[in-house]
Image: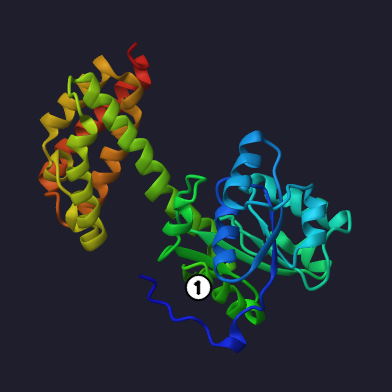
């Protein structure tokens, strides 16, 4: 359950008309959540067939119109486009006069703060950066998952209460992120979530190759316990051959990966070295064992550099 109390009435934004520019997985879900809080979605823009279907499913009876028309109809506009597309979108909207003075312009990029909205700010818009720390499916389940979801919030000081109020109305937990810290904050989330998905998918693939019939059932309890332990204890939760300094086992792993899954070698080596460094720094890996282990990792890395990866 969301632990944040609702803001006092004077700090809550008035009931607003809401528009979505970029009906990907995020925008329609946020707009649907705002509708549950009493706001009124009035327009959305989307190019692909999938975007149009998504908007129709999550925002029924809300018309799909060009971005400029979304801004013409809405008091609160959600800019939910990919990070790299955001600066050009904001600049284009400002140049064409689509941005209105007093209009709340909210982007959901993790990378950017409010600086990217500067062209719209010059046109009189009120800039907010509200980044939901969640992976989205593009379905109605996302609206439910927003309950208790953290949002990385960046806004001018005078808009801080309004930004936090919007997050709380969506069921989220606001977490203030300084403008200059946004790239580091986003990198941390990418390491924790995006790279985790890659590691899990690769682990599933290798287990199937080893003959395991239900790798998801095998990994579920292991990964659940590992995640819980890591969140509770950080580096103290490290286990396995690298943390123990089992150099022979690590060498055997690399040999098997080179034989059966050469595409996985580089990732294994990178994570093994990082794990060894952290385990050593936190006193979990004995220095005398670390020397042998890092020697193994260095040898296999050098071998790749001299001879290239094996086919």
Res 267 → quadrant:
top left
Residue at the image position 55 percent from the left and 46 percent from the top: 25
The residue nearer to you, when weighing 163 against 144, is: 144
The residue nearer to you, when weighing 123 against 303, is: 123
Q: Quadrant of the C terminus?
A: top left
From the top left corner, tell me how far across and down residue 127 is, in percent. 69, 68
The residue nearer to you, when weighing 54 against 222, is: 54
Query: In the drawing, does residue 223 fall left or right of residue 115?
Result: left
The number of numbered badges drawn on the structure is 1
Classify mark 1: helix, strand or loop: helix
The residue nearer to you, when weighing 10 against 80, is: 10
The answer to whether residue 58 is above or below residue 259 is below
Which residue is the extreme one toward the front? 61
From the top left corner, tell me how far across and down residue 256 is, in percent. 20, 20
Q: Is residue 180 visible?
A: no
Residue at the image position 58 percent from the left and 87 percent from the top: 9
The answer to whether residue 79 is above or below residue 170 is above
Label 1: which residue? 168
Which residue is the extreme one toward the top? 311
From the top left corner, tell me how far across and down residue 95 is, in percent. 87, 55
């Amino acid at each position: 359950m969301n632990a944040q109390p609702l803001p006092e009435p004077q700090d809550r934004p008035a009931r607003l008309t809401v528009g979505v520019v970029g009906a990907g997985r995020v925008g329609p879900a946020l707009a649907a959540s705002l509708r549950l809080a009493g706001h009124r979605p009035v327009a959305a823009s989307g190019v692909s067939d999938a975007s149009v279907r998504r908007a129709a499913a999550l925002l029924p009876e809300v018309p799909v119109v060009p971005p400029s028309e979304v801004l013409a109809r809405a008091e609160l506009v959600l800019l939910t486009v990919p990070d790299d597309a955001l600066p050009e979108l904001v600049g284009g909207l400002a140049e064409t006069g689509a941005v209105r003075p007093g209009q709340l312009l909210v982007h959901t990029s993790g990378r950017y703060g409010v600086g990217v909205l500067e062209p719209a700010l010059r046109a009189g818009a009120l800039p907010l950066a509200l980044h939901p720390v969640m992976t989205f499916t593009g379905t109605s389940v996302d609206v439910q998952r927003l309950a208790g979801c953290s949002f990385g919030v960046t806004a001018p000081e005078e808009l801080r209460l309004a930004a936090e109020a919007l997050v709380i109305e969506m069921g989220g937990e606001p977490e203030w992120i300084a403008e200059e810290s946004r790239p580091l904050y986003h990198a941390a989330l990418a390491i924790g979530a995006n790279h985790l998905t890659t590691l899990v998918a690769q682990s599933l693939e290798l287990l199937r190759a080893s003959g395991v019939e239900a790798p998801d059932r095998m990994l579920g309890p292991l990964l659940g316990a590992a995640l819980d332990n890591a969140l509770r204890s950080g580096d103290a939760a490290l286990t396995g051959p690298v943390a123990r300094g089992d150099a022979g086992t690590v060498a055997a792993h690399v040999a098997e990966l080179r034989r059966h899954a050469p595409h996985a070698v580089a990732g294994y080596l990178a994570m093994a070295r990082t794990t060894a460094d952290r385990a050593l720094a936190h006193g979990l890996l004995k220095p005398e064992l670390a020397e042998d282990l890092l020697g193994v990792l260095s040898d296999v890395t050098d071998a790749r550099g001299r001879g290239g990866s094996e086919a």
